[in-house]
């Protein structure tokens, strides 16, 4: 297949996907419905290799995203969520944070493909500082033995959009509304500005979070949290100050860039081992709430 308009980056990715399929065998693309996974799926279709494509429901997915996937990608296997973000907040006793992302463990990482299957993602180096350190083929430390493959890791955002627009690939309408990254509504790994914008856009999600915060407080005595609104204010604004001095696993303090859209799912703990989930929760509670 000749794709001269793109130069080498599209043809090179297709060639590499075919090589991976030939050498590694079974491939599973983790599909999010975002622009990068859209292009990754298109590349796999152009490569003509056998692969599986899966999408993990989280209970806090934008409704427009779900409608988009159901409409344009009915072949994608949907993995239903076992619980909800809001039930977990009540059960854990505090909201998810950057250092204790129990929601990601349940909704995303739990569905990592088996060890005998290569897990494919649309991760790119240009997405963030942390992801700039990633490699095309990696071993997942969160789930040892799982191999990750990122076929468009060196691509720029402009290259991604060129493929989408040139080939008239459908994409979520949210991009046209100014959302440059699409993920869980109210994700604590993004900026406070984005969380506020999302809650203004999807008010029922804000109400659901407030409901969870209220249930979470029942039977528990927190010094700083007396109402669901106290928790919401902390969730959006207050917790970020804690990360400036937080020591994690003996490493230097984590100084996150908190500007708009600099961090999102998996950037910080994507390759950290998650052993002893309850211990992680207790540790986070002690650090952040006491």
Image (cartoon, rainbow, N blue to C red):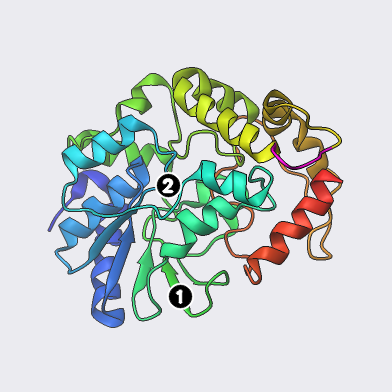
Question: Is the residue marked by circle 1 packed among few (<14), some (14-19), or many (20+) residues within 10 Å?
Answer: some
What span is colored magenta in the figure? 218-222
Residue at 57% across, 59% down: 270
Q: Is residue 5 above or below residue 78?
A: above
- Residue under numbered circle 2: 58
Q: Is residue 216 above or below residue 210?
A: below
Image position, residue 177 (x, y; %): 38, 20
As for residue 155 lying within the magenta part, the answer is no
User: Relative to the observer, which residue lies in front, 52 or 225?
Assistant: 225
Q: CA distance from mark 1 to mark 2?
A: 22 Å
In this rendering, position of residue 135 left or right of residue 249 = left
In this rendering, position of residue 5 left or right of residue 227 = left
- Residue under numbered circle 1: 146
Secondary structure character of the magenta stretch overall: loop
**Residue at the front extreme of this rendering:** 219
Image position, residue 289 (x, y; %): 81, 44
**CB within 8 Å, label 1 to label 2:** no
Residue at 25% across, 35% down: 68
Residue at 86% across, 36% down: 223
**SS class of the residue under badge 2?**
loop
Q: Quadrant of the N terminus?
A: bottom left
**SS class of the residue under badge 1?**
strand
In this rendering, position of residue 14 left or right of residue 127 = left
Q: Is residue 266 visible?
A: no
Which of pointers 1 and 2 lies earlier in the amino acid sequence? Answer: 2
Task: Report the number of discs.
Answer: 2
């Amino acid at each position: 297949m000749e794709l001269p308009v793109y130069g080498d980056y599209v043809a090179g990715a297709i060639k590499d996907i075919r090589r991976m399929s030939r050498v590694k065998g079974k491939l599973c693309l983790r599909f999010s419905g975002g622009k990068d996974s859209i292009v990754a799926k298109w590349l796999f279709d152009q490569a003509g290799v056998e692969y599986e494509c899966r999408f993990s429901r989280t209970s806090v997915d934008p409704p427009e995203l779900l409608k988009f996937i159901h409409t344009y990608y009915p072949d994608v296997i949907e993995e239903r969520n076992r619980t909800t973000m809001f039930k977990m907040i009540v059960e854990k006793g505090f909201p998810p944070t950057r250092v204790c992302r129990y929601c990601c463990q349940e909704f995303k990482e739990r569905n990592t493909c088996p060890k005998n299957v290569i897990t494919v993602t649309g991760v790119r180096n240009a997405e963030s500082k942390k992801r700039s350190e990633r490699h095309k083929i990696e071993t997942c430390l969160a789930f040892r033995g799982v191999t990750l493959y990122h076929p468009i890791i060196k691509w720029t955002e402009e290259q991604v959009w060129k493929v989408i627009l040139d080939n008239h690939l459908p994409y979520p309408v949210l991009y046209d509304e100014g959302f440059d990254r699409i993920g869980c509504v109210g994700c604590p790994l993004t900026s406070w500005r984005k969380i506020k914008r999302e809650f203004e856009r999807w008010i029922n999600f804000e109400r659901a979070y407030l409901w969870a915060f209220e249930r979470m407080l029942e039977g528990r005595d927190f010094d700083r949290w007396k109402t669901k609104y106290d928790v919401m204010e902390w969730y959006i604004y207050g917790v970020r100050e804690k990360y400036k001095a937080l020591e994690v696993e003996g490493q230097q303090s984590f100084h996150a860039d908190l500007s708009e859209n600099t961090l999102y799912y998996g950037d910080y703990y994507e390759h950290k081992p998650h052993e002893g989930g309850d211990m992680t929760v207790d540790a986070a509670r002690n650090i952040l709430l006491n």
